[in-house]
Amino acid sequence: MQRRAVFLDRDGVVNRSVVSNGKPFPPPDLGAFELLPGVPEALLNLRRAGYLNIVVTNQPDVRTGVQQRCVVDDMHASLLGRLDLDAIEACFHVEADACDCRKPKPGMLLAAASRYGIDLGASFLVGDRWRDIGAAHAAGCKAFFIDYGYDERRPDEPYVVVDSLADAVSRILAGNPSPTKRSTEP
């Protein structure tokens, strides 16, 4: 029997993004790495319901030299030590690398599905950017979009708009997760 998972973008879903001029950025260091409210409880609730919790994150700043890999590794070690996470998949490529793992491509989700025996059609992704939702679509997952109103491209439908990871988890666990049309209901 295949397992179900909730894939989570990191910055903006699990931890607070740094927003500058309407655009989100990852925190610069571990000192600025702040969990969003309700995240530990939401992940624990998913775990209790039998879901795998897997972070899937683009971290191109490592490739461009803006961020050091050891800092990202420290952030991920912190998350793994503090939260009910099963894995963290990270892509360190930039768009020009044309890799299969950088969202909106589904490579990180497909790799995790293969590794952990995940049924992607019974799984979900929670993200805050169009690339996250694109990866969910490409992998065959249902998508939840935390809409912070960033000054960037909107995701392609279908997805359900939620206020937070906790909101998405409440919908998943209540059996109301079907993002077959755009919803702006809280």
Image: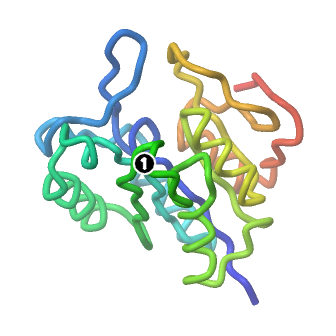
Which is nearer the eye, 67 or 116?
67
Colour setting: rainbow
Task: Say which residue appears at 82% left-offset and 29% top-offset.
Answer: 182
Q: Where is residue 35 in the image (x, y as percent from the top left)?
A: 31, 43
Q: Where is residue 97 in the image (x, y as percent from the top left)?
A: 44, 51
**SS for callout 1:** strand
Q: Is residue 83 left or right of residue 95?
A: left
Task: Say which residue appears at 55% left-offset and 18% top-offset.
Answer: 152
Considering every residue shown, the one lying at the far bottom of the view is 1
Considering every residue shown, the one lying at the far top of the view is 21
Q: Is residue 20 left or right of residue 7?
A: left
Q: Where is residue 101 in the image (x, y as percent from the top left)?
A: 52, 59
Decide: is 41 above or below 86.
Answer: above
Quadrant in the picture for residue 184: top right
Decide: is 25 above or below 118.
Answer: above
Q: In this view, does 11 lie to the left or right of 104?
A: left
Which quarter of the figure is the C terminus placed in?
Answer: top right
Decide: is 79 above or below 11.
Answer: below
Which is nearer the eye, 142 or 60?
60
Which quarter of the figure is the N terminus placed in?
Answer: bottom right
Q: What residue type is labelled 1?
A: Asn
Task: Say which residue appears at 58% left-offset and 63% top-offset.
Answer: 107
Decide: is 80 above or below 42.
Answer: below
Q: Residues within 10 Å of mark 1 (few under 14, many from 20)?
A: many
Quadrant in the picture for residue 129: top right
Q: Report the label total.
A: 1
Task: Say which residue appears at 52% left-offset and 21% top-offset.
Answer: 148
Q: Where is residue 2 in the image (x, y as percent from the top left)?
A: 73, 84
Q: Mark 1 points at which residue?
A: 58
